[in-house]
Image (spheres, grey):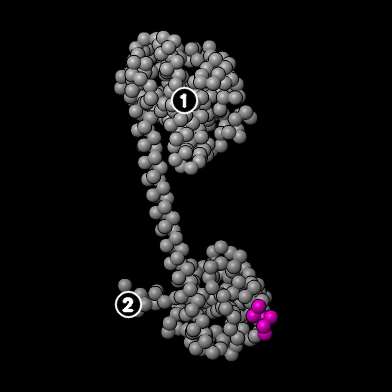
Amino acid sequence: MNPALQSKAEKPTILIVDDTPDNIMLLSRLLKDKYNTKVANNGSTALQVALATPELDLILLDVMMPGLDGYETCRQLKANPATSDIPVIFLTAKNQIEDEAMGLSVGAVDYLGKPISPPILFARVHTHLTLRAARRQLHEHNQNLERMVRERTSQLLLMQEALILAMASMAETRDGGPGNHLRRTQHYMRALAMKLRSHPRFASHLTDENIELLYKSAPLCDIGKVGLPDHVLQKRGKLDPEEFEVMKLHAAYGRDTIMLAEKHLGGSNSFLMFAREISYSHQEKWDGSGYPESLSGDAIPVSARLMAVADVYDALISRRIYKPAFTHAQSLEIMRQGRGSHFDPDVLDAFFAIEHEFARIAEEYRDAEEEGV
């Protein structure tokens, strides 16, 4: 780049607004060595120039002009987001205290009287240009900090999700569960919640934030199985009554594990609340025949009712150590029989309305050993 052009480009740009040509000439001559200057002889033109000059750094503005006076010009500059941060210095013969007060009240950063005192003008211009440069640097610094915080937060959220999946996978591995069960269940929960979000019974529960939290907490559904003995958890045949009572303890184990995390954190949050509800109550049934507390109807948390559908569907289509895999159609028929007994009727109806979406999720996250399903 030509050194002269580069030097010119690096100079701050000042807009001089005055309806008197002699004043414009004088100010231009005073400022030309240190600054690039633009001129306007009325308020309307000044607004146009300010909008058309993105590199504009400061405005020297007269008050007494025909048409749009300086005060109104300043008001409009400050009202427009595109020009609101450009510092305005009034330079005028109106030098009464009330005039200065008016100038500052409409958004000017300074108010200088005529006749012009060059040393004072240079000092004030330099001061406000320096302040504006500092504000810009601070703004850029804050933007960089915000970007870094977003990136770090994103990394922490990914790490959190990975740890949750790792913890939940321990229970699934001991249970002989399929490798992608947790991923499928997460997506079932989200799809079901999205379908029900406009339903009058569920709209207040299924906000965007809560749906995302349900998605993230779903893998902790069976975290309590980590505490079960192998002879019960990995039994290939049907559990006897005594073994089934031991199996039922996994709900309390899961709840207690999450409550321990809440205690460590000094309180709960929505994520942990959903995880606790899901782990403790997803085995409850609509008619009250489930466990651990034989809850029925709306006494069962919404999160647990959603998980009951998602978990049962995936258990049916998956091969386990104690059962073969059912087809999608067979699973639908089995679940249909549980409407109003095992499952909340409205939740099950939503499931059937999007059963093709469940099938798609099951196919996308299918386990290698499920190729024949």
Residue 361, percent across and down?
A: 42, 26
Residue 355, percent across and down?
A: 49, 21
Name the residue beneath numbered marker 1. 252
Residue 357, percent across and down?
A: 46, 25
For the N terminus, give its image quadrant. Answer: bottom left
Q: In the figure, 264 relative to 183: above or below?
A: below
Q: Quadrant of residue 366?
A: top left
Q: Mark 1: give few (<14), some (14-19) or many (20+) Cα within 10 Å.
A: some
Name the residue beneath numbered marker 2. 3
Residue 264, percent across and down?
A: 44, 40
For the C terminus, give its image quadrant. Answer: top left
Q: Is residue 366 visible?
A: no
**Image mark count:** 2
Q: Is residue 119 visible?
A: yes
Say left or right for 117 vs 248.
right
The residue at the point 45 percent across, 70 percent down is: 134
- Which residue is more in the foreground, 349 or 268? 268
Which three-letter amino acid code belongs to the residue tagged 1? Ala
Q: Mark 2: give few (<14), some (14-19) or many (20+) Cα within 10 Å.
A: few
Q: Nearer the viewer, mark 2 or mark 1?
A: 1
The residue at the point 41 percent across, 58 percent down is: 144
- Which residue is more in the foreground, 123 or 290? 290
The residue at the point 57 percent across, 24 percent down is: 300
Tell me the SS state at disc 2.
helix
